[in-house]
Image (cartoon, rainbow, N blue to C red):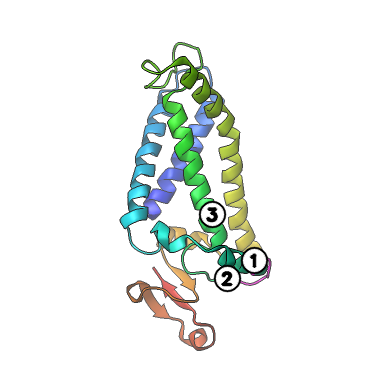
Amino acid sequence: MRIFHWLLAVCVIVTWLWGQINPTGFLTLHFYLGYTIIGLLAFRLIWGLFGPWPARFRDFVYAPGTVVAYLRTASLRRPSHWPGHNPVGAFSVFLLLGALAFQAYTGLYTDPDDFINAGPLVAGAEGARVSWATFWHQTMAPVILLLVVLHLSAIAFYRFWKRENLVPSMINGEKVVKGYVPADRIIEDLEEEAAATGDRRTA
C-alpha cells in the first residue's frame, strides 16, 4: 500500500509537470504516466474493497457526527493518534482519488487540436464529448495541483502544530494510535502510556 502511495505521488507530479513544461510538444511520457495512474487507481479500488484494515474504504467512511466531533478537536496542539485515516484525511483520500479518476478519464478523450497529442479514444468519440473532455482535462490540472498542495499542507500542519509526524508511517507502515484496531495489526502496546491513553503501535 505504501508503494502505491509513493508511485501515485511520483506519477501525478511528473505528469502534471510534463504537461505544464511541454504543453505543445510530444506528450508520450504524459500519456504513459496517465495509463500508469489508471492502473494504480484500479488497484486502489480493488484494494479498497477487499484489502486489509485500514485500506478498506468501509473502515474510513465516517458518520457526520464523528466528523464534527473530530473537527472540534482538530485545532488542539496535541497528536490525535487516530487509528487509520482520520475523518479529514479520509475525505481528502476520496477527493483526490475521485479527481484523479476524472482527470484520467477526460484525458482519454482529450484533443488539444495539435494533431499530435490526442487521447487514445478520440477517434471513435463524438465531437461534443471530445470538447467537453478537453475543457475539463485542462481545467482540472490546477485543481489537482491545489489538492496536492493542500495534502502537503495538512501533513505540515500535523507535523509542526499537532506534533504528529505522519511521514514515517507512510514509509515504514507503523503508527501510534488510540482506540480500537484489529488484534492482528497491533505490534506493541506502549507500556508507559498505554494504561492512561490506550496508545499502541500498529501496522
Is residue 14 shown left or right of residue 150? left
The amino acid beneath tag 2 is Ser
Which residue lies under the disc numbered 2?
A: 80
Asked if the magenta segment contains residue 109, the reply would be: no
Task: Name the residue nearer the viewer: 29 or 128.
Answer: 128
Where disc 3 sits, the SS reads helix
- Dots 2, 1 in contact, CB < 8 A: yes
Which residue lies under the disc numbered 3?
A: 91
Q: From this view, report whether residue 3 is shown above or below residue 179.
A: above
Q: From this view, report whether residue 149 is shown above or below residue 104.
A: below
In the rendered image, residue 75, in percent from the top left (x then y), is placed at: 68, 66
* Lower sequence index among marks 3 and 1: 1
Residue range (magenta): 73-79
**Mark 3, residues whose alpha carbon is within 10 Å: few (<14), some, or many (≥20)?**
some
The amino acid beneath tag 1 is Ala
* Lower sequence index among marks 2 and 3: 2
Q: Quadrant of the C terminus?
A: bottom left
